[in-house]
């Protein structure tokens, strides 16, 4: 499974980072960095939680 | 969630209810009516309002995410005059037109842009709450829920002088006219018109130096946004940034006053502040109903909304859907409902939610540190077509921490 970011749509609300800090973070400029886009079975739930919580639907699972 | 129906044959019409979403009783206490509508189905036709209401969580979330089918391009209000007036704003457009308008609106409003403001807003909220607590009794809506967002939005956008005094009335009217053509809307159009007029003539020099508002005009000057786009953006900051935040902050005070056990949980574990705000938003949605228009026949769980129909999204009803939230009519801060519907979702998700969170978190944090219990009188409500808020809430006594 792969996490995909629609970069122009991301406004940096950071709720995904709270849901899945091991997979993504906001950098010092407030830009989202996906640390690990390819996610295994063990972290699938985290990835889905991060996608679900994005208030502007900028994340999706491909 | 839905699929294009090849033909309407064999498809059922949604159930019908004679409920009037905009009656005084429903506007001030919508939750019993919402439960009745949800029991009928995820879509209910309301002839009194000429709308199809979305009542359940899944249907609402899918509609908010599906702008191609549930379009904003014909307006998000419930009367043709307001829908025409909002044409060409990010509120009443869809991608691709919407994309650039949204970017201009959020460039200075996104959490990224607001990062530097947190400590300032925390300090303002804390000083305000400290003063009120020290005074021992106060009017919570005027002195806190209205005072804080007014000051923060006014300073941020750069409103000065007389305009600051008109912000509350303008914001209230701008939201009121989203409703159907009832008396509230009729009485509010002249006041909403004043705001509209002011925004169409306001210039860079009218806004404080270094403010976001002035920044919008500078963006227009350098061509980053189209000529004439700055005024409508200022309009949205004011129309959306005050009224709904006032509602949310008032709801924080009212809900913690009536649920001291929940305040105690936040006092014990301050990391619950964001969860508590999510639960306040879920439990009492600041916006009752918001509009969309279908671009095609849409099937939802076996019933069809016809193409070109006006849809009413009932955020608060979805937030109380027992199919999605366990024990939905109980206020529990530990629930942390991160996926509540009150701020919308997707391309039209609340553009000011970063600022709203900064303000609300600061208020909850200050209350939790300084207050053990608020003894309050009876809260009063005044029906409003769109925004549901506490109008007055006397705090009679503060039991301090």
Image (cartoon, coloured by chain):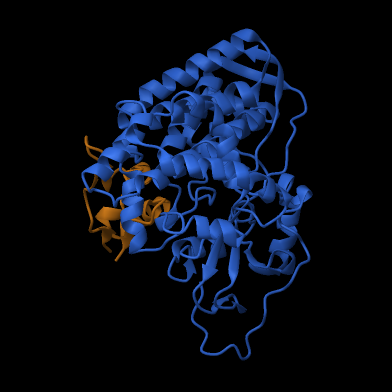
Q: Residue at x 73, y 39 (%)?
A: B382
Q: Is residue B319 left or right of residue B349?
A: right
In this rendering, is residue B83 above or below B269? Answer: below
Place of residue B195 in the rendered image (x, y in percent of width and height, measured from the top left): 52, 40
Residue B352, visible in the rendered structure:
no
In this rendering, is residue B286 above or below B211? Answer: below
In this rendering, is residue B75 above or below B263? Answer: below
- In the picture, one chain is blue; tell me its letter: B
- In the picture, one chain is orange; tell me its letter: A
Place of residue B130 in the rendered image (x, y in percent of width and height, measured from the top left): 54, 12
Place of residue B385 in the rendered image (x, y in percent of width and height, measured from the top left): 66, 49
In this rendering, is residue B290 above or below B294? Answer: above
Q: Residue at x 64, y 39 (%)?
A: B331
**Residue found farthest to the top:** B134
Say which quarter of the image contains residue B36: bottom right
Q: Is residue B111 left or right of residue B288?
A: left
């Amino acid at each position: 499974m792969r996490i995909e970011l629609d970069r122009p749509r991301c406004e940096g609300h950071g709720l995904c980072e709270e849901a899945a800090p091991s997979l993504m973070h906001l950098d010092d400029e407030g830009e989202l960095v996906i640390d690990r886009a390819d996610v295994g079975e063990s972290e699938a739930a985290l990835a889905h939680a991060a996608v679900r919580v994005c208030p502007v639907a900028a994340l999706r699972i491909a | 969630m839905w699929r294009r129906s090849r033909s309407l044959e064999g498809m059922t019409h949604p159930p019908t209810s004679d409920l009037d979403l905009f009656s005084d009783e429903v506007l001030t206490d919508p939750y019993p009516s919402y439960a009745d509508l949800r029991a009928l189905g995820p879509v209910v036709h309301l002839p009194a309002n000429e709308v199809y209401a979305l009542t359940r969580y899944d249907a609402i979330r899918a509609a908010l995410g599906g702008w191609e089918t549930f379009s904003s391009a014909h307006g998000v209000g419930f009367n043709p005059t307001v829908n025409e007036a909002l044409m060409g704003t990010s509120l009443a457009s869809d991608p691709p037109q919407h994309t650039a308008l949204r970017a201009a609106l959020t460039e200075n409003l996104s959490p990224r842009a607001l990062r530097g403001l947190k400590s300032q807003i925390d300090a303002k909220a804390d000083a305000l709450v400290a003063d009120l607590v020290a005074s021992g009794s106060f009017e919570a809506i005027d002195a806190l829920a209205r005072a804080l967002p007014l000051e923060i939005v006014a300073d941020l956008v750069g409103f000065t002088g007389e305009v600051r005094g008109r912000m509350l009335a303008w914001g209230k009217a701008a939201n009121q006219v989203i409703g159907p053509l009832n008396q509230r809307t009729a009485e509010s159009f002249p006041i909403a018109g004043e705001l509209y007029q002011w925004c169409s003539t306001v210039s860079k020099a009218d806004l404080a130096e270094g403010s976001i508002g002035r920044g919008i005009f500078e963006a227009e000057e350098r061509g980053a946004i189209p000529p004439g786009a700055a005024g409508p953006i200022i309009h949205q900051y004011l129309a959306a940034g005050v009224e709904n935040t006032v509602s949310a902050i008032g709801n924080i005070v009212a809900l913690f006053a009536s649920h001291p056990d929940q305040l105690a949980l936040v006092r014990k574990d301050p990391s619950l502040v964001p969860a508590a705000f999510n639960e306040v938003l879920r439990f009492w949605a600041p916006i009752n109903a918001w509009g969309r228009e279908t671009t095609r026949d849409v099937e939802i769980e076996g019933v069809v909304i016809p193409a070109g129909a006006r849809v009413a999204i009932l955020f608060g009803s979805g937030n109380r859907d027992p199919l999605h939230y366990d024990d939905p009519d109980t206020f529990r801060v530990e629930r942390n409902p991160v996926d509540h519907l009150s701020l919308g979702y997707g391309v039209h998700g609340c553009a000011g939610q970063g600022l709203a969170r900064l303000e609300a978190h600061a208020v909850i944090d200050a209350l939790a540190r300084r207050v053990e219990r608020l003894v309050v009188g009876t809260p009063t409500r005044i029906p409003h077509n769109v925004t549901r808020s506490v109008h007055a809430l006397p705090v009679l006594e503060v039991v301090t921490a």
